[in-house]
Image: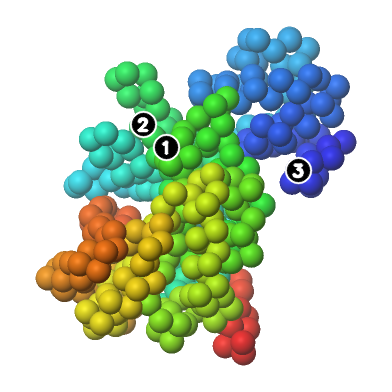
Amino acid sequence: MSTHPLIAARNEGPNALLLGMDRGQLADYFTGLGERPFRAQQVLQWVYQRGELDFGGMTDLSKALRERLTVEASLQLPTIRSEQRSADGTVKWLIEVGAGQAVETVFIPEPQRGTLCISSQAGCALDCSFCATAQGGFNRNLSSAEIIAQVLLANQSLGRRADGGWPVTNVVFMGMGEPLANYRNVVPVARLLIDDFSYGLSRRRVTISTAGLVPQLRKLAADAGVALAVSLHAPTDELRNELVPINRRYPIAELLDACWSYADGPGGRTITFEYVMLDGVNDSIPQARDLAALMRGRPGKVNLIPFNPFAGTRYRRSPKQRIEAFRNELVKRGALATIRRTRGDDIDAACGQLAGRVADRIKRRLGAKLRRT
Ligand code: SAH
C-alpha cells in the first residue's frame, strides 16, 4: 500500500482514518486505491473548507468512490464532553480521546481574529515546575486526527462568521503537551492548517510552541515552516534547569542556536520567547538585563506571561509593576517585549492552566531519568 513513511501504520486495515492526513499522505492513500492523487485535494476541500464529513455528500467524487470510502474509510471526530464560556468570551472545550482521557482546547476571540489553542498530547512528560498540565503527568501522544479535530470541532461549534468564514483564523500549539515530542503527528497538522486546499492559513497564523526539543526544532523548518514560540522562562541555565527540566538536555546556548537557524527558514523572521513572570524567581532587573543580552542583535521578541496559578502550585504571579519594570528594562536595552493579556482565567483556560483528564503513565519514570542526567 502506501510508501509514505508517516502513514504506513495508519493506512492499513479496512477503516482508514482520513482525518489528519496531510495532502501528500492523502494522495498516497488514493493512489493506493488506484485513484488519481488529486482526489486528495477534493477531499481536503470538502472536509476542512466546507465541513462535509459524510463521504456520500462529496458530490464531485464518483458514486463508486463515495460508496467505497463510506465502507473503507472514516472521518470520525472525537466528542466534546463539555464546553465552558468565560466572562471575556474565551471558550474552553473538554474533548474525549478514549479510555477516559480528555484534552482541552481554548478559543480566544479578539476583534480582528479568533485564536484556537490546541493540545498535542494527553498530558505532558516535560515536568515544567510552573505548569498545571505537568502536574497531571503524561498518558500518550494525540493522533493527527485528534489534533486537527480540535479545529474542526471549534469551527463547527462556534458556527461560521457573518462573512461566511470560519471563526478560527489563528492556531497556536500552546494547549496541553509538548508538540515537538509528538513530531510525527504534529507536522501533518501544521501542513494541513497552511494548505490552500484545506484551511489555507498563512504561516504567520500558525504557531508551534516548544519547551526546547532541539533535534526536532532543527528539522521543523524543512518539514513545516510555521511561526515558532519558545518557552524560555529564564536567562541562565541554572534557573532554567529548575523551571524547564528539559534544559538539562538542551541548554540555552544550544536552544538559541537552533532558534536563530530557524529564523533563517520559511517560518522564521522573528521567534517569540515566552517568559512566565514568577514572583521573586525570574522577575528581577538583573535577570531582565541578562535576557536582553541573549536577544541582542537577534530576531527574537519576548512575550511576558503573567503566571496563572493553579491548585497546589508553589509560585505566585509577579506584581503588575514588576512585570512592567521588567518589560521596560528589556525595551531600554533594545529588546522587543510585550506583556500577554490574561484571558479565560475564570474558567481555568489561561496559559498553563489546562489539565484535562489524564491517567498518568510515565511521569515518575521520566522524572527519575531526568534527575540522573
Ligand atoms: N509545551 C509547549 C506548549 C505549551 S504552551 C511549550 O512549553 O511551549 C503554553 C505556554 O504557557 C508555555 O510558554 C508555558 O511555559 C506557559 N505556561 C505554563 N504554565 C503556565 C502558567 N501557570 N502560567 C502562565 N504561563 C504558563
Dividing the picture into quarters, in which one does residue 40 lie?
Answer: top right
Q: Amino acid at mark 3?
A: Ile
Q: Kindly report the distance in space between the C-alpha atoms of the residues bearing marks 3 and 1.
A: 26 Å
How far separated are the C-alphas under marks 3 and 2?
30 Å
Q: Amino acid at mark 2?
A: Pro
What residue occupies the far left of the structure in this picture?
A: 321
Q: Residues within 10 Å of mark 2 (few under 14, many from 20)?
A: many
Q: CA distance from mark 1 to mark 2?
A: 8 Å
For the point 37% across and 67% down, the residue is: 295
Residue 271 in view, yes or no: yes
- 295 relative to 191 in the view: left or right: left
Q: Residues within 10 Å of mark 3 (few under 14, many from 20)?
A: some
**Tag 2 secondary structure:** loop
Residue 231 bears which disc, if any?
Answer: none
Left or right: residue 343 compared with residue 128: left
Which residue is located at x 27 percent, y 64 percent? 334
Which quarter of the figure is the C terminus placed in?
bottom right
Q: Is residue 44 positioned above or below 225 on the image?
A: above
Of pointers 3 and 1, the one earlier in the residue sequence = 3
Q: Which residue is at a point 69% across and 13% down the rendered structure image?
A: 61
The reply to whether residue 96 is in sight is no
1 and 2 marks in contact (CB < 8 Å): yes
Amino acid at dot 1: Ala
| Residue 165 percent across, percent down from the top left | 38, 23
Q: Position of residue 205 (x, y in %)?
A: 42, 40
In this view, the residue in front, 352 or 254, is 254
Kindly identify which residue carries mark 2.
Answer: 167
